[in-house]
């Protein structure tokens, strides 16, 4: 089972073998640690060919483009080409690295692609992912190079009924189910507990947050999503907010106009691999910054006014305001804080900030919990602290889609008198 985590900034792949009870993380480059397993979600064009390597023309923001314009033919073609090339690379690595294990073996493949946390298992987006996944698999297994004509032909074939003997099964699995799969199958998971969790995945462009409950009945799993939010609060958007802040203040001074214009050159695309400085103060040397009054700078404004508001207000508090859960349910909910962006110094402090509560409302205080590194995942060079970068791909590679009975958004289930008095639980407008 090839688990494909198609991310905004990077793509991760894990191949799961349920017969061997092993999962293999796929490296895409010769690098140290987790970086070897992170493939930039960027496509290159060299003449009429599409490649994953360098070329005269590049296309980035593939996932964002697909979310914004799912019916655009060019967008579908570029995403299909990218996934096909990723599949080729992953299978080539597997058959090279584990030639002895698979030589002379007939494999039955499943391609599992992750869906955004707010998505259920049915609807237009899952069908589109399945269609693009099927087309990409057919293209990856065909002879010849990946060209526009080959992509269009594969997409047409994917839109038709499966041919006799077609080997591939494609499933679109919600990332929320995949990301916590390793945890819920570990010894730390107590099936008799309430198992309510807050998940926050910090990426380059967005922060995906979700409050959900996991239930297990035998081998079947269900995921009840209480609230979910996907907002443009990722690391590169924090960087862009800093650029805007600097430009706004520099343009107020004649001597700062040239520097303000130079800032435009580092605005950068969302999927750019640059690592922004730890603080907005580190962008310019030789400039003294004095904050007066209530001014706190762009970093505090971004974390407190956007990221914390998303997690506290539009994820946790919204479950209360919509009569889905009461404060006793929400209080101290475990927080899985994941993603590459969670490592950035600006974002790394978010969990401890949330644990302090807000203006005395202690029930809006999640407690961080780490994902467990699965014992059956072969991922040389990666330490436990970096496993969450691969957790979606691992879950996709090992989770049986038939065992997930539902992933759905819940409806109000508490009577008004169960919510308590409004003065006890009110959260001000600046936090919701």
Image: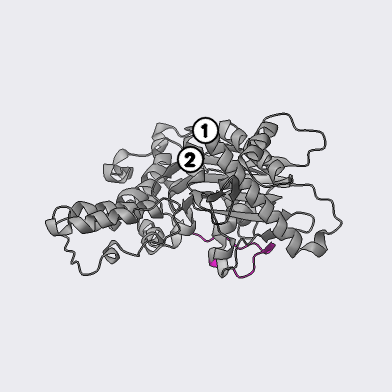
- Which quadrant of the view contains residue 138? top right
What range of the chain is rendered magenta? 368-385
> Residue 180: in sight, yes or no?
no
Between the residue at mark 1 and the residue at mark 2, the CA separation in whole angstroms equals 9 Å
State the quadrant of the C terminus: top left
Q: Are the residues flagged by discs 1 and 2 in contact, CB closer than 8 Å? A: yes
Q: Which residue is mark 1?
A: 72
Q: Is residue 410 above or below residue 90?
A: above
Q: Is residue 202 visible?
A: yes
Answer above or below: position of 324 versus 337: above
Horizontal side of 331 relative to 27 (left or right) equals left
In the image: residue 344, left or right of residue 165: left
The numbered mark, 1 or 2, whose residue comes first in the sequence reads 2
From the viewer's side, name the closer residue of 243 and 354. 243
**Residue at mark 2:** 65
Total numbered badges shown on the rendered structure = 2
Verify whether residue 375 appears in magenta.
yes
Q: Position of residue 254 (x, y in %)?
A: 12, 56
Q: Which mark is residue 261?
A: none
Could you say where residue 344 lies in the image, as x and y percent from the top left? 41, 62
The image shows residue 105 at horizontal and vertical percentages of: 85, 55
Q: Nearer the viewer, residue 282 or 229?
A: 282
Residue 110, percent from left and from top: 72, 45
Asked if residue 374 is among those painted magenta in the image, a careful observer would answer yes
Residue pushed farthest top? 160
Colouring style: one colour
Q: Majority secondary structure of the magenta segment?
A: loop
What is the secondary structure assignment of the residue under circle 2? helix
Q: Which residue: 38% across, 50% down?
A: 364
Taking the image as shown, residue 10 lies to the left or right of residue 349, namely right
- In the orientation shown, which residue stands out farthest toward the front? 47
Which SS class for mark 1?
A: loop
């Amino acid at each position: 089972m090839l688990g494909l985590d198609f991310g905004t900034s990077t793509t991760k792949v894990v191949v799961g073998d349920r017969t061997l009870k092993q999962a293999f993380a796929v490296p895409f480059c010769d690098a140290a640690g987790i970086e070897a397993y992170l493939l930039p979600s960027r496509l290159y064009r060299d003449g009429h060919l599409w490649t994953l390597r360098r070329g005269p023309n590049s296309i980035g923001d593939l996932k964002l483009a697909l979310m914004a314009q799912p019916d655009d033919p060019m967008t579908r073609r570029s995403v299909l080409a990218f996934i096909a090339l990723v599949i080729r690379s992953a299978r080539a690595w597997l058959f090279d690295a584990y030639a002895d294990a698979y030589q002379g073996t007939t494999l039955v493949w499943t391609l599992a692609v992750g869906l955004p946390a707010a998505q259920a298992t049915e609807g237009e987006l899952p069908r589109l992912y399945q269609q693009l996944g099927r087309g990409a698999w057919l293209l990856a297994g065909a002879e010849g190079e990946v060209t526009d004509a080959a992509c269009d032909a594969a997409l047409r074939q994917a839109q038709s009924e499966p041919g006799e003997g077609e080997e591939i099964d494609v499933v679109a699995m919600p990332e929320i189910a995949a990301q916590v799969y390793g945890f819920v199958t570990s010894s730390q998971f107590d099936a008799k507990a309430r198992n309510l969790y807050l998940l926050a995945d910090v990426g380059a462009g967005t922060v995906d947050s979700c409050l959900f409950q996991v239930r297990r009945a035998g081998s079947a799993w269900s995921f009840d999503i209480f609230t979910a939010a996907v907002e443009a609060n990722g690391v590169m958007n924090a960087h862009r907010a800093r650029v805007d802040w600097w430009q706004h203040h520099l343009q107020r001074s004649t001597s700062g106009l040239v520097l303000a214009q130079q800032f435009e050159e580092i605005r950068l695309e969302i999927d750019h691999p640059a690592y922004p400085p730890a603080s907005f103060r580190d962008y310019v040397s030789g400039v003294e910054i004095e904050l007066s009054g209530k001014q706190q700078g762009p970093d505090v404004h971004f974390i407190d006014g956007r990221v914390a508001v998303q997690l506290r207000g539009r994820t946790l508090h919204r479950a209360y305001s919509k009569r889905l859960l009461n404060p006793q349910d929400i209080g101290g909910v475990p927080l899985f804080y994941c993603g590459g962006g969670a490592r950035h110094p600006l974002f790394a402090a978010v969990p401890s900030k949330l644990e302090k509560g807000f203006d005395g409302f202690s029930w809006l205080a999640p407690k961080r919990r780490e994902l467990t590194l699965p014992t059956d995942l072969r991922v040389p060079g990666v330490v436990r602290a970096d496993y969450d970068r691969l957790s979606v791909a691992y879950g996709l590679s090992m989770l049986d889609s038939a065992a997930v009975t539902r992933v759905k958004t819940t409806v109000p289930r508490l009577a008004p008198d169960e919510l308590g008095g409004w003065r006890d639980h009110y959260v001000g407008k600046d936090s919701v």
